[in-house]
Image (tube, rainbow, N blue to C red):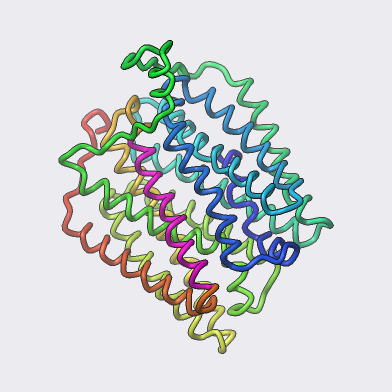
Amino acid sequence: MCVGVMGTALASPLYPLYQQAWGLKPSDITHLFVVYMFGALTSLLFLGRLTQRHGFLAILRTGLALMTAGVVLSALAWNVPVFMLARLMIGLASGMITTSASIGMVQARPGRDPRRTAALTTVAMTLGFGLGPLVGGLMAQWVPHPLVTAYVPTAAMGLLAVYALHQLRGLPTGGTRDDALPPGTWRGVIAQWMPRLTPPPRLRRRQFWLASMGAFSAFGMFSLYSSLAPSFMQEIVPWHGPAVSGLSIAMILFLSSAFQFMVRNWRTKRVALASGCALVLCNLLLMATTLTGATLTGATLVFGAAVIATAFGHGLANVAGMGVVAKLTTPEERGGLLSSYLIVGYLGTIVPILGMGWLSDHVGLNRGLLVFCGAMALLSAVVTALGMRTAEIPVPQQHL
């Protein structure tokens, strides 16, 4: 999982270089970022049942191979359409990897406390998201031909991971056949590919949707840093370059992993409420960073505090969401509800950031950032307030 998601945010510190090389606007950068998310959503909608049908290991191998191919194509891209195709491939692979690897973690650790398994899963995923922009940014800063060489380490690790998975033995990986329709008929073939998301239990819908909207807010904030942070950092902090922007994105994710590990034994409701408060705070701090841009030293300190608050909110939102999904399902049915949860979260990386790109073109980057952060702070505050009045889901008896 860690290596498989490295390619997802790898291009983030490179966007200013693409912007200069291809003459792109801020909205074009958000479109490049969102193409990846559309690929991930498509994967969750139309490929989510493949893990249940063919087993997690086969889908994880396929996803890693597709991810590696997308990284290689990114390095070879000579124009925007080719690069968008590469990002689409990476998005499709990301959905396959996160779903299959999450299910595999549960099957490899049967009978364990779902909170700890959820925390370990999100830590591995977050570390991979952070390593991509860190390695890519460092390579792009000091190695010639950055739009090519920055992808080499991740592609090499992807090839190694594909090989390693083919050597793996002894895990329960078998899928189950869907007998709802005869597989030999055209209706059966179509049905295998149509979306079939799992709804939450009727009595626990409130908890599921609050956890999902927490992920929506957290993913939206991370998307802001991943897509436009290299651009707005040039105006509000004194350090520039792919290494700096890559390090800031990676720092959010590394701190997020550390915070996830720290709260692995907390009650799920406590994690969710702390996450919501942190997401409100990080938006307010980012607004303060923009408003104090003329005072460079003050802006840098406030920006650092915003990064830490974003990492805390992002990490705890992941733990809370995965914990709710784990409590609501058995390992056999977890894939469908996990896909439903991730789809809501991924929408948070698409809808707000498209709005941010539109605002940047029409009112300027700084004013657009103020509107974006104000709206996201309000959303997080509402979700947190509702969460305080919502009962916590008890840990299933088999995990006590």
Q: Is residue 320 above or below residue 335?
A: below
x, y percent for residue 101: 49, 33
x, y percent for residue 255: 50, 57
Q: Is residue 116 above or below residue 252?
A: above
Nearest the viewer among 250 and 283 is 283
The structure residue drawn at horizontal position 56% and vertical position 65%, both measured from the top left corner, is 27
The structure residue drawn at horizontal position 69% and vertical position 58%, both measured from the top left corner, is 137
Q: Which residue is at the far right?
A: 144
Q: Quadrant of the C terminus?
A: top left
Majority SS type along the magenta span: helix
Q: Is residue 211 above or below residue 113?
A: below
Q: Quadrant of the N terminus?
A: top right
Q: Is residue 343 within the magenta segment?
A: yes
Q: Is residue 79 left or right of residue 5?
A: right
Q: Which residue is at the far bottom?
A: 294
x, y percent for residue 76: 76, 46
Q: Is residue 272 left or right of residue 80?
A: left
The structure residue drawn at horizontal position 68% and vertical position 54%, both measured from the top left corner, is 80
The mark tally for this picture is 0
Q: Is residue 399 above or below residue 2?
A: above
x, y percent for residue 61: 58, 27
The structure residue drawn at horizontal position 73% and vertical position 44%, both measured from the top left corner, is 153
Q: Which residue is at the far front?
A: 186
Nearest the viewer among 26 and 111 is 26
Q: Quadrant of residue 326?
A: top left
Magenta-drawn segment: 337-360
Q: Quadrant of residue 60?
A: top right
Q: Is residue 244 within the magenta segment?
A: no
